[in-house]
Amino acid sequence: ANGSSRLRSHSDSSRRTTSEELIPREVLFGNPENISPQLSPDGRYLAYLAPSPSGVMNIFVRDLTSEREDETNVDGDVEQCDRMITNEPKRAIRSVAWAYDCETIFYMNDFDGDENFHLFAVDATVDATLPPSDDESNDDDDSVPPGTPPGIPPVRDLTPGANVKAQNIFTNYRYPDQILVGTNERDAKVFDMYRVFYKTGVKSLDTLNPGDVIGWKTEDESFEIRAATVRNSEDSSTTIRIRTSADLVSNASTPSETEWKDVFHFPYGEEGGLINFCADGGKTGYLTSSLGRETTALLKVDVRTGETLEELYANDKCNVGGVTLDRDTKELRALTYNYARTERVFFDEELERDYRFLQSTKPNPNAEIGVSSRSLDETKWVVSYIRSDGPTEYVIYDKPTQSITKLFVSKPKLLKYTFAEMEDVRIPAHDGLELVAYLTRSQTTKPTPLILLVHGGPWARDTWGFNPRAQWFANRGYATLQVNYRGSTSYGKTFLHKGDGQWGVGDMQTDLTSAVEWAVREGVAEEDKVC
């Protein structure tokens, strides 16, 4: 969608943008009912998050190969034959991921809100609809909390210990029996990397954090930690360290192969980071960098010397976003950027054809396409259709047959109501700087009271999509304007740092004033009714 400083016109002058009745707050702000659908690597199972009978988000599993009388649940409710495989009674599970054994599911959770998130594993193939046999009874299993319904499989804590936190989790299909995970069990202030054989629980220290590393990267063929992101607390610069080989490699011919070397450096004000290694044993890789330019570009680099080998893509208005690589060859397949809406640039014709097909099947022409997961052979995809005027819809795309099967929507209670579309618009600031903003209106032909909804951070940004607060206001007669003022992220380093020292004052504040003046000029807002 291409926004502009002039608003779209509407042919129906009397049309209200939302339902006439007041939409209940619990409908707008309640938890989603079906989210985070993930295919198992073999494409047989679908895991997703949904409320348990007590209303807490837990993990459910569906066998996609089983016979189903109703292939599609149009109301978006949990199917009766789907199995709940966790029973977290208090704290909602927020993420779900498959192991490459196609049986184990990983998730993270803390303990009564202490924010010490542990990594847990559960067997997704245990049929929770059947009562356990005598030797499978949960009664004597310490990993099953008291009161757990019969048939819920035991959960294993892969990162146990008081006050331990887990992060930086890596899986690799070439090594289906192991994962790499960071924990602070040795030193509460830093995260070392551990290699965990999750079936047995055997864990060993893999890479020691010297104290300044805030993130790690692996080389896929060896599944070794080969890159570290370092933040300098004194000057806020960022450095990428590389090692040719890892400490655990027994055939390292010289000590230098296992030593870390500072290769890429981003002073304060610059942006960038290592995306991944190429499939050449870790000699080259993909890097984003704003060095010598306004926005981040995607580069192919020599990770041993830091030399740029090729500039693959750059956008003058915004940073490079997500990058899609071939799982085996590491060839670049596609990337995204988001100036106002998510846009894709393709480097793979086959992948582009898939997206063209998905574009043709969108339930709403203004929807954005997302891919939640793919099977390992990429014959099945979970696709999301993201809308600004309704819930996200999830479908399965079967690539060989070019067919779509509906799964569910994220918040089925929204389906009975009408919502306003969000418009992406461009607003000129007082000094001519272009600002991207998002407008949600309650009426399309006359001014209304206006809510200026300002994002926090300030190093953050607003994006297009369904916004419960904007819809709440629209349903009650207010327009909502969300502005990416100077200092917002993803628009390049100059735009970002124009906001330095301007929080609540100066040009940053004037951007908000310019946005309100624009809304009044365009007939969106009543001049004396702005909040």
Image (tube, rainbow, N blue to C red):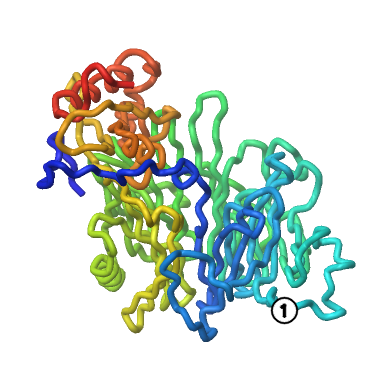
Residue 457 versus residue 67 in the image, above or below:
above
* Residue 400 relative to residue 250: left or right: left
Residue 17 versus residue 282 in the image, above or below:
above
Question: Is 402 or 137 nearer to us in this picture?
Answer: 137
Q: Secondary structure at mark 1?
A: loop
Question: Is 394 or 195 nearer to us in this picture?
Answer: 394
Residue 406 position, x and y percent, is 40, 71
Residue 499 position, x and y percent, is 35, 22
Q: Amino acid at mark 1?
A: Leu
Q: Which residue is mark 1?
A: 130
Residue 483 position, x and y percent, is 30, 31
Residue 413 versus residue 139 in the image, above or below:
above
Q: Give the tally of numbered discs.
A: 1
Question: Is 53 or 261 nearer to us in this picture?
Answer: 53
* Residue 495 relative to residue 282: left or right: left
What residue do we see at 38% from left, 38% from top?
472
Question: Is 340 or 440 nearer to us in this picture?
Answer: 440
What residue do we see at 46% from left, 47% from top?
27
State whether residue 426 appears in this view.
yes
Quadrant of residue 427 within the rendered picture: top left
Q: Quick one: label 1, few (<14), some, or many (20+) residues within 10 Å?
A: few
Quadrant of residue 106 within the rendered picture: bottom right
Residue that protrudes farthest toward the right in the picture: 140
State whether residue 268 appears in this view.
no
Residue that protrudes farthest toward the front in the picture: 21
Residue that protrudes farthest toward the top in the picture: 505
Residue 24 versus residue 174 in the image, above or below:
above
* Residue 39 relative to residue 424: left or right: right
Quadrant of residue 131 within the rendered picture: bottom right
